[in-house]
Image (cartoon, grey):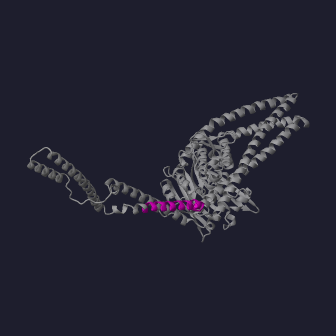
Amino acid sequence: MIFEQVVLHNFGVYRGEHRIDLDVAPEKPVVLIGALNGSGKTTFLDAMQLALYGKSARCSGRDRVGYPEYLESMINRDAPPHQGAGVEFTFRARANGQDARIRVSRTWQKRGESIKENLEVFRDGEHDAVASERWVEFVEDFMPSQIADLFFFDGEKIEALADPLRSAALLRVGIHSLLGIDLVESLLRSLQQVERKRMTDTASESDKSMLQAIEAQRNEIQHAHEANMLKRASLQNDVDGIEKKEASVAEEFRRLGGDLLVQRDHLVSEQAYYRKKKAEIEDELRVLAAGALPLMIPAKTLETAYSRALSARRNGNADLLKVEAESRDASIEKFVGTLGLRRDVLTKLRSHLKADRAQRYRSNVPTGAISEEILNQFSHEATQAMGRVAAHTLKSLSDVDEHLSVVERNLAAVPASAEVSRIQQEMDACRTERARIEATIGLLDEEVAAQRVKMERLQAQAEREAEKLGERLTRDEVSKRMIDHSSRGRKVLATFRERLLANNLHRLEFSILNYFQRLIRKKTLVHGIAIDAESFQISVTNQAGQLVPAHRLSAGERQLLAVATLWALAHASGRYLPAVIDTPLSRLDSKHRGTLVQNYFPTASHQVILLSTDEEVVGTYLDRLHPSVGRYYLIEHDESANTSKFVNGYFSPSHSEMRV
């Protein structure tokens, strides 16, 4: 199916006649329509649905008024009364095995106090009287009204479907419609009503009172259950709103330095620690400075002094040895004199020993009084070790100074408590309110589960009571035969419904997972999708293979899951239908908009009609979508003519070809 053209005639804010061509090429499937709020984009979406479905159309504002009142309200106020209003919709579709161009024209006028509506259908330019008369049946062949929500939707619906309970309701309706399960269940209810009616018609008041009491009790619990489900959905929306507000308040808290205020006591403690540490290191440096460390500054001079001191110590040792040698040599001379040697021999020996002593114990530098303990302090090894200690101590001082500087800067940035106390109170209030609502949701979940158990028990009890009642009516052979055949038929239909549902749920789970992973940034976030066959609530499987309820995802992730669900259901319908999306990004946060623009819009269908405000598909999002856009329109309000109108172009001037 391809939408070719929409014609508006005095419809809503569109005075006069307006023709909008929608046909696109396969390689550029997107029609992008820009409009400011209030200029008529939702009216355009309503026009298409009204042309197709008439009084069954889900148009905006239809909940509060009847169909005639709605038609009257959509006649342009400035149009001449005799012209009335109308919408015309042309599309290509396959009918009776052949491609056909269908044009639906729906017009209406106010005549007196009533509204007169006229519907005409043309097939390939020829008036089709049968289709015009029975269009309600014909349109179901092209686009069944029960699945229209899969192809006509807006950002508000995406946000609503992000609630797990509402998405469960959509899944239930979608799956039942697509698989025909709603027809099976309708038949089951009809058979059950036939059985009950037959029983109650032939049974006495006392016989059927018990069954009626059980059914009344079950209906009462059913109504309470539905009310609780609606209440829970509303509370979940409240939680989402509080989470958004909490994130905003937390960001404001950080911007004002609230995090530093929370850490103030710790910062003060760190400041005292580093100041004490700095004082200790400075004391160590003073001790080093009071010792030999300053002498390391003139390193060459110190080295020369140490060398001379060492030589002096060696010379002192030589003088001591010389004295000892002289005493020894005198003893030798005395001993040799007793041997009776000639005088000249003794003279030569004395001269030799003296010369030997002079050679052996020669001293060039005067001896000093430097002790060995003091001298050892200036050895090469000692000075090297002293330098390493000094360098390490200075490095420690530098590190402590750096840490102290950071702490003191943070302390200086700590705001006064009065500046952030209001924000802190708002954060606390958000947390308290969220905890309260989540606790209420928890209690509601328990109550809903208990109600389901009660309803199942009462249903089983009602069936047993109905069987007993049927047994008491065995004297009525016709009733017995009818009830017996109906009961067996219900069992067969129930088995068929369960098997049909089970066989198709798995395919739908895989399809939703596939589309969700195409949309989500964190590809490993979800490894599987599971749909409960009873409640139709969606759960996701994490990396560990554990089931996690969908409401545990973030609000943005739940919205993408809702889009993936719509996408999968549309695909599962087997219908080759366009997608029409109003304000597609209005409810999404910025980090999820890009993936929707890039991965969903160009491939959502073979034809995608987007109605965007000036804050959605613009800038980088427009640049990403541009290669897939076949037509651009801008809805502008003409003050002089008091009407909105479609013009070729778009908000952004970045693409000159848009301004055709």
User: Percent position (x, y) of residue 400?
Assistant: 47, 60
The residue sitting at the bottom extreme is 640
Judged by its main secondary structure, the magenta piece is helix
Taking depth in this image into account, of 421 and 24 the one nearest to the observer is: 421
Residue 493 vs 572, above or below: the answer is above
Q: Is residue 267 magenta?
A: yes
User: Percent position (x, y) of residue 38?
Assistant: 63, 64
Q: Is residue 41 magenta?
A: no
User: Percent position (x, y) of residue 137?
Assistant: 68, 46
Taking depth in this image into account, of 474 and 404 the one nearest to the observer is: 404
Residue 369 vs 135, above or below: the answer is below
Q: Residue at x 78, y 30 (%)?
A: 485
Q: Is residue 212 left or right of residue 229?
A: right
Taking depth in this image into account, of 414 and 596 the one nearest to the observer is: 414
User: Percent position (x, y) of residue 75?
Assistant: 68, 63
Taking depth in this image into account, of 587 and 398 the one nearest to the observer is: 398
Q: Is residue 435 visible?
A: yes
Q: Is residue 205 left or right of residue 184?
A: right
Q: Number of callouts in the render?
A: 0
Q: Is residue 568 left or right of residue 356?
A: right
Q: Residue at x 82, y 31 (%)?
A: 467
Q: Is residue 651 visible?
A: no
The picture quadrant where one finds residue 488 is top right
The picture quadrant where one finds residue 460 is top right
Q: Is residue 482 left or right of residue 43?
A: right
From which residue to which does the magenta span run?
259-286
The picture quadrant where one finds residue 430 is bottom right
